[in-house]
Structure formats: C-alpha cells, structure tokens
Image (cartoon, helix red, strand yellow):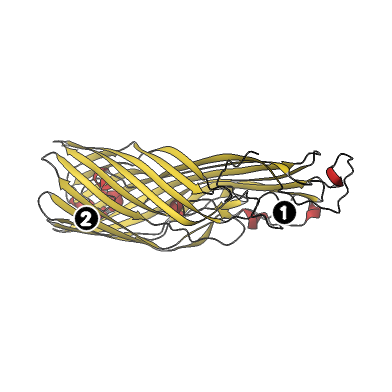
Amino acid sequence: MQRYIYVVLLFFITADITAQENHYWTNQFGSRSALMSGAVVGGVRDTSAGFYNPGALGFVKKSSFSVSANGYQIEFVSVDNGAGTEEPKEIESQELNIVPLLISGTVSLGNNTFGYSLIGKNQSSIKLSGRRAELIDVIASDPNYISPYKDDLNGVAFNGVEDYRGQFSYNSKVSEILAGLSWATNIYPNFSFGVTGFLALRSQRYNASSVVRATNGSGFIASEDQFSDADFYNLRTFLKFGIAADFDELKLGVTLTAPSISLYGKGSVGAGSVKFKEDEAIGTLEDDRQNDLDATYKTPMSLALGLEYMFTGQTIIATTIEWFSEQSDYEIITPISRNFKVGESLGYKDSKEVLTIKDGAASVVNFAIAIEQGLSNKMTGYLSFRTDFETFQGHEGELKPMAINNWDIYHTTIGIVRQKKDSKSAIGLVYSAGHQSDFKQLANLDSSTKQADNFLLASENQTTADYSALSLIIGYTYFFK
C-alpha cells in the first residue's frame, strides 16, 4: 500500500480575493526607508518621501535620482497535514521573486519640490502540487445493487477497497505597480506640506484543479473533478497628503491616504465540478466561464504618524504607526446570471451567485521601529522591526478565499548604507515569519473523516500554517549637482 503524498490548496469553486493579499506592509521602498522598515514617516528626507510622506519633500533641496532595484525575495509556505491528518506531513511552496522596489527622483525649484516615483508595491507567487495513491475503502457499497457483470465481486459494485488516485495543483501570482507624482512646499520654516497623486495597476491570477479517481477489481470507476481559475487587472487612483515638521534632533510627520477610486479593469472567472459513479445514479456536471467582465479593486483610507529622534550624533531612533480603516465588502467581478448546472433537467444554479468575486478587509494597525547607528564617516548601520497584520475578515457563501496568507507576519531588517560625495549605496537582509494556528484545510483526503454526504473528498478540518521569507535589499542613490 502506498501511503500519502500530500498537496495543499485545493479550491473547489473559488474566489474571494483579499486586499493586498491580506497585508498592507508587505514591502518597503527606498534604500534608507526599506532598511528602517518604513519607520520614516517623521524623518524621511530622500526621494522615497513621495511614498512615505510627501510633506517631507519640502525639506529635500537637492535634485536627485534613486534606484532601489533588484530586491530578491524567496518565500516559503508550509501547511501541516495539508490534505489530511492520518499522517502528519507538511506541504511546502518555495518561490523566488524579483521585486523592483523603487525608482524615484526629485527636482527642487525655489520653495517647491517636485517628485516622481515608480514602485513595485506587491510581488508574490505560490506554486503547490502533489499526488496521493492508496488502496482504501473510500466508497461505501450499496448492498441492494445487483451488478449486470458476472465477475463483479459478490454482485455488489465497489465492494471492499478501491484503488484511489488523486492529483492536485495550485498556482497564484500577484503583481502591483504604483506610479506617483508629488509636490511639496515649506509653509513655515519648520513645517512642510505635500501631496502625491498615485496611479496603481494591479493584476492577480490563480488556477487550481483536482482530478480524483477510484476503481475496484471489476473495473467500475468513480471520479470527482474540480477546477477553478480567475484573473483580473485593475487601474485605480488615490491621493496621499502629508505634513512634516523638522526641529533638528526631533522630526515629526503625519500622513492621510484617501480611499482609492477604481478607473478601469477587466477580468475573467471560471469554475466547474464533475461527479460520476458507474453503479449508481451519480452523474453531475457544473461548469461555467465568463470573460471580459468589468473588474473593480479598492483600498481603504489610512492615517500614519511618525517620529524620529537623534539621541546622539551617531544614534537615531524612529517609529511609525499606521491605522487602516475597514474596507467594506464589495464585488470585484460580477458575472451575469445563467445556469451553472449543465442540463436543464438537473435544476437551476445561478452562476452569478457561484462565481462572483468578493473582497473586503478588516481594520488593522501596524507599527515599525528602527535604529540608525553611525559606524564611521561613510558607513551607517540599521536594525529595524515591523508588524504586518493580516486583514482577512472572511466572506459568507460557497466560494473559498483565493488568497491563503491569513496570518500575521513580522519582519526584521538589518543592513548598511555607504555614503559617497555624490551618491550612496545600501545593502540589507529582511527575514519575515508568520504562523496561523486555525488554518482551514482546503482539501482533505483522509478516509477516517469521511461523512455520509462526501463522495471522494472529505470535509476540511483545522490545521496550522507557517510562512517565512528572506529578502535581499540593494539600493543606489545619485545626487545631481
């Protein structure tokens, strides 16, 4: 008997998507800002201010160009008992992503500073696949059934154990790019006000499938197939306002990010389910796919406060806290109504109810703290920490969530910056970790948990999931004369 080779992440008919893959502080941008885990709302004084606090651009009086590119990240996802609990094993995903963090610049004209930025806000992918093959009594026999085949064991189909084969696969990818134009001016000698207008292009896709078969010695076959896939892109816009105050050793900042406005988007969604059993009247087919549908994506309002204090000429401590408001549930993609069941005699099931993609996010508060320590005239060291709390609040209905990372993540960063006369370079490492103790299985192949209304798949149980990532930050800034 061959035991389990598990896979996690089987989606039946899918597709709730969650904001920013359930997190808002996934990545940080800019050489110094990334090394400080984003704890720069109060003290940012470089080109990344257009993203963190446009008000602080008023204190940037040198025209400059900055590239924090080629941020490499390897992500690990593991789920205990991923597709069953009879043999505790982990299902893992390991993906290497190239994250273009930030390309930005500033131009200073008198009392005004203008900035531009191109940001790789969110880049992530997950790939999982697996198989299970086992001799197991997965189908209950019907003692009242009389087989027409003479070689059928005891005249009863699916009597005893069956040769069970299951195949699963899951793939997902998220990409989001921000482009911003900023303006700032000094309103008082120690105060500056600014605003950035952003365009955000988000694309997201995923596909999942399962093929499950069972057969007995007399040649009868039972099968249960499931698939689902969805993809969309959306262009939205939003404004970010900021005020910065500079009192030499003490720097303060506050920002307000307005809710986004969806401009344009398109997407498609499809799903299906097939169940078939030769010796009984089990034969159902549900299937639909709809393309070229309007797609909407939203992000909520947020408010951030930041402080940076210079304890000595070599030591700076900074902190930032940001509150994100709740994002009420809304529909990203709304299909048209038609029969999801194939065959009029099988009844009616509305594709609109089955395939509608929903989104929503709970209110969260994240914070970051950082230490900047001068090491020499040209070298500065950094150590920082930030939270990255998940926003998933769940959705009612038969669809399962598209994003799986419903865990809080904690990021720790260490790195150095080397300063030259007209440029500076940075390098750093980020370690990220998260854990979820109530992760719900998305597939269950255990025979011991079968229920009367289950066919070849059992109902899902609670398990645990772990996330970790290691990222490399490389940055370079050139100052024009």
Which of the 4 image quadrants contains residue 5? top right
Residue that carries the numbered disc 2 in the rendered image: 318
Q: Dot 1: within a 10 Å radius of its alpha carbon, few (fewer than 14), some, or many (20 or more) residues?
A: some
Q: Which numbered disc covers residue 362?
A: none
What residue would you read off at disc 1?
339
Q: Amino acid at mark 2?
A: Ala
Q: Which of 373 and 325 lies nearest the eye of the viewer?
A: 373
Q: Position of residue 161 (x, y in %)?
A: 73, 45
Q: Is the Cβ of the residue at disc 2 closer than 8 Å to that at disc 1?
A: no
Q: Nearer the viewer, residue 189 or 414?
A: 414
Q: Could you tell me which secondary element the residue under label 1 belongs to?
A: loop
SS state under label 2: strand
Q: Spatial distance from mark 2 to mark 1, Cα to Cα?
A: 57 Å
- Mark 2: give few (<14), some (14-19) or many (20+) Cα within 10 Å: many
Identify the residue at horizontal 60%, vertical 39% (top origin).
Answer: 131
Q: Quick check: can you spot residue 33? A: yes
Q: Position of residue 397 (x, y in %)?
A: 60, 60
Residue 383, given in percent of the width and then of the height, sits at: 23, 48
**Residue 182 can be seen, yes or no:** no
Identify the residue shown where x is 81% and y is 39%: 218
Judging depth in this view, the residue of 208 and 257 nearest the camera is 208
Q: Earlier in the sequence, mark 2 or mark 1?
A: 2
